[in-house]
Image (spheres, rainbow, N blue to C red):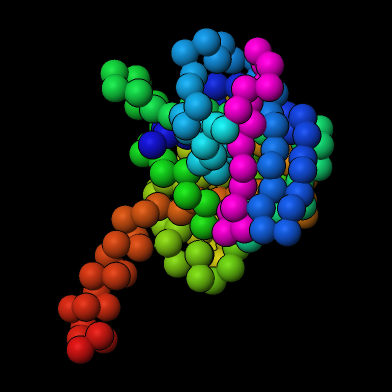
Amino acid sequence: MFTGIIQDVGSIASIQREPEQTHMTFTTALDMASWQLGDSVACNGCCLTITAFPDVATFAATLSQETLNLTRFSHALEGDVVNLEPALRMGDALGGHMVTGHVDGVAVVKSVKAVGEHREFRFTLPESQARYVVVKGSVVINGVSLTVNLVDGCDFTVNLIPHTLSHTNLGALESGAEVNIETDMYGRYVERLMQFSDGEFE
């Protein structure tokens, strides 16, 4: 589990693509002294398992075909900047919201508007995911926990403060950019329960 509070902005150091999977290494300025093989790290919001430590500033992970199908990592490039958050530990502050690291798909930046020192981002996403986004609900964009301000069909807006703009890779986003998105899991549980209560599977 994660909180959606980014701890470092690293980068993709290397990419090795295979027919059914892709191996990537990531650089980070975080202290990895206590990290172990098998630990989880959210990379642009996607929960990845550490498979190796090539050096003191780099960790490696293997991305399955399912992960590649659902995230922007399918066409990532070496040098791309990546938001990083190690897995939540007992006693850590819950500054964002409970994030699983299970990316639902890719959303697209529709517009960016300056509002004082802040920026209002408008995203659009497929209808299959849009139904889980609600006003004042939580959403995760490239691993960043954000609050939904407005919902309009398959579009929604969020407001980013200067700290978020300067401490994550969201500040560099422009119209047309793609991002990983994780919607609120509770909507999916409610939907699943309603399917059974309506007798859909009888």
Span colored in magenta: 52-67
Q: Is residue 139 visible?
A: yes
The percent position of residue 59, horizontal first and vertical second, equals: 63, 26
**Image height of 194 relative to 183, above or below:** below
Please name the residue shown 55% across and 43% down the image: 46
Quick one: quadrant of the N terminus? top left
Residue 146 located within the stretch drawn in magenta: no
**Image height of 100 relative to 134, above or below:** above
- Where is residue 172, by image quadrant? top right
Give the residue furthest to the bottom.
202
**Image height of 201 relative to 95, above or below:** below
- Where is residue 197, by image quadrant? bottom left
The percent position of residue 80, horizontal first and vertical second, equals: 77, 36
Does 158 sit left or right of 99 as displayed?
right
Residue 64 located within the stretch drawn in magenta: yes
The residue closer to the viewer here, 64 or 102, is: 64
| Magenta stretch, main secondary structure class | strand
Q: Is residue 178 visible?
A: no
Does 2 sit left or right of 125 as displayed?
left
The percent position of residue 82, horizontal first and vertical second, equals: 67, 33
- Where is residue 161, by image quadrant? top right
Please name the residue shown 77% across and 29% down the image: 13
